[in-house]
Image (spheres, coloured by chain):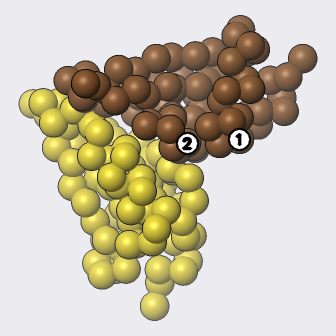
Chain colours: A brown, B yellow
Amino acid sequence: MKTAAIFYHAGCPVCVEAENQVADALDPARYDVEHVHLGEQSGRIAAAEAAGVKSVPALVIGGTAFHINFGAPMSALKG
Amino acid sequence: MKTAAIFYHAGCPVCVEAENQVADALDPARYDVEHVHLGEQSGRIAAAEAAGVKSVPALVIGGTAFHINFGAPMSALKG
């Protein structure tokens, strides 16, 4: 069974770079990578925060949050 | 030809987690991942900084530096 990975972003330049270079670099044979734009899917913010996400871009792999560089804090994504 | 990726770390807990969950998750069919312990290989610090690495753990993919969470600043690794 593949490991679930969620890449959280907000469409910012730092996010796009991390998406193209890190999230898309994961081994597709071992990981199912879902991409979530928190600016457009604010209903997913609570789950991201519960997983430990404090800023975007972030990659949650197997339940652990990894912040990749820094684009925007979660607070900036809340309406 | 595979893309070169270098995972820079210093053996810290945050580094080990990033190594096990992110660096080792890269697709081996597309990336050649080298692991460099900057605490033991201080001769590699200059090249890491030139690539934009400011703290460890960090992953340099195709010449671009991605800082993954925060373990230690580069200054802590210099004798």
| Left or right position of A57 against B53 | right
Say what amino acid the circle numbered 1 marks: Lys
Q: Position of residue B8 (x, y in %)?
A: 36, 61
Label 2 neighbourhood size at 10 Å, few (<14), some (14-19), many (20+)? many
* Residue at the spot 40% in from the left edge and 21% down from the top edge: A33
Query: Which numbered disc covers residue A30?
Result: none
Label 1 secondary element:
loop
Residue A54, disc: 1
Q: Amino acid at mark 2?
A: Ala
Residue with the mark numbered 2: A65
Residue B54, picture quadrant: bottom right
Image spot of residue A40 (x, y percent) = 71, 8
**On screen, residue B1 above or below B42:** above
Cα distance in 3D space between marks 1 and 2: 9 Å
- Give the residue drawn at x 28%, y 78%: B41
User: Is the residue under label 2 in contact with that under label 1 (CB below 8 Å)?
Assistant: yes
Residue A16's x, y, as percent?
Answer: 53, 23
